[in-house]
Image (cartoon, rainbow, N blue to C red):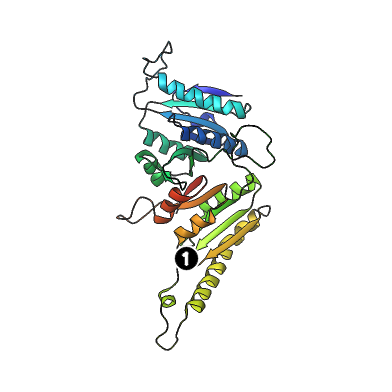
Amino acid sequence: MGHRRLWSWPPSVVMTPVVTVGLDGTPESLSAVRWAAREAELRQATLRLLHAWVLLSVEPGGAVRESDQNYWAERIMAEALRTVTERHPDLSVVEDMVAQDPVGALLAAARESDALVLGSQDMAPMASYFLGQAGLHVVARADGPVVLVRAGDDVLVRADDDRDDTASVVEGRDVVMGLSLHGPCDALIEFAFDSAARRGVTLRAVHGRNLPPPAFTHGGGAAPYTPGTVAGRAAREAREELAGALRPWREKYPEVCVEDTVWVESAARTVVRGAAGAGLLVVGRRRTRPALSPRVGHVLSASLHHAPCPVAVVPHD
């Protein structure tokens, strides 16, 4: 077990890939720690435990007592480290505590990491996500993949797992990728294929295609339409586009079993429906959005609120 305490993260000294998990002491944060530890293991990466708080002392305090300025930060870090070492004693772990605004620290971590993992609160009975302002800012602005994990997202065990506890990361479940086909999104596709390959599971690519206006009319003009024929044509065109987008990636990752599905409905409904039974949902976020548009689009918003599994948000051009 190689871990060391840092008070300023020096990425130049870590040559291996890095998975960073943000810590805030909540149950969701510990679920994120467990998920991130397994992800780091899959990637043969260093796990970085990051806690940012503007009131941290520059140097660690002396005696540990509740009146010390860093007492709770130290306690949060110790609990996270204990959670990791119980399951992954050989994993390389770096403890990083920074006196900085959490949003800025997490955005910097996203630039330096293969993935940034955050906990997300479950606020409704139908497995919804709640993102505070910090989490929303990070998801909307991060330069690298951000994975949102709720409390409980990491506790489903494999069918062949005979352990008597439920602290195992979800295993053996498909990776689902929501694909828009409205422009290049190589970073999104590569992350999804790579995730499926590392887990040895099927990648399910799903795409939703809204019907064109003629599908909702009963006829008119020189070429009357019926809902069935227009819907069929739209679905056929979408399947051809989806197959074309996936073709080079199937060749790059021949070991990954890929299933592609098109539903003639909204993209948001498609992604949420497609995520049923998945171990990970991968969706994209365009780095540049129109000036007056919301920070996250409706598909990403639906994914974060309704997907029944961890959600990886991958920025792309």
Residue pictured at 39% horizontal, 15% vertical: 66
Residue 302 percent coordinates (x, y): 43, 53
Looking at this view, name the residue that lies furthest to the top: 63
Residue pictured at 61% horizontal, 61% vertical: 247
Residue 198 percent coordinates (x, y): 63, 44
Viewer-nearest residue: 287 or 269:
269
Viewer-nearest residue: 69 or 27:
27
With respect to residue 309, does 92 lie above or below?
Answer: above
Residue behind mark 1 = 265
Q: Is residue 172 left or right of 176 when viewed as pictured? A: right
Residue 58 sits in which quadrant? top left
Residue 37 percent coordinates (x, y): 57, 34
With respect to residue 169, does 188 lie above or below?
Answer: below
Residue pictured at 60% horizontal, 48% vertical: 194
Q: How many marks?
A: 1
Q: Is residue 259 left or right of 115 when viewed as pictured? A: right
Q: Is residue 48 visible?
A: yes
Residue 24 sits in which quadrant? top left
Label 1: which secondary element: loop
Q: Quadrant of the N terminus?
A: top right
Residue pictured at 55% horizontal, 72% vertical: 236
Q: Is residue 15 visible?
A: no
Residue 239 sits in which quadrant? bottom right
Other-residue count near label 1 (Cα within 10 Å), few / some / many at <14 / 14–19 / ≥20: some
Residue 189 percent coordinates (x, y): 54, 54
Looking at this view, name the residue that lies furthest to the left: 292
Viewer-nearest residue: 224 or 180:
224
Amino acid type assigned to the residue bearing label 1 in the image: Glu
Looking at this view, name the residue that lies furthest to the bottom: 222
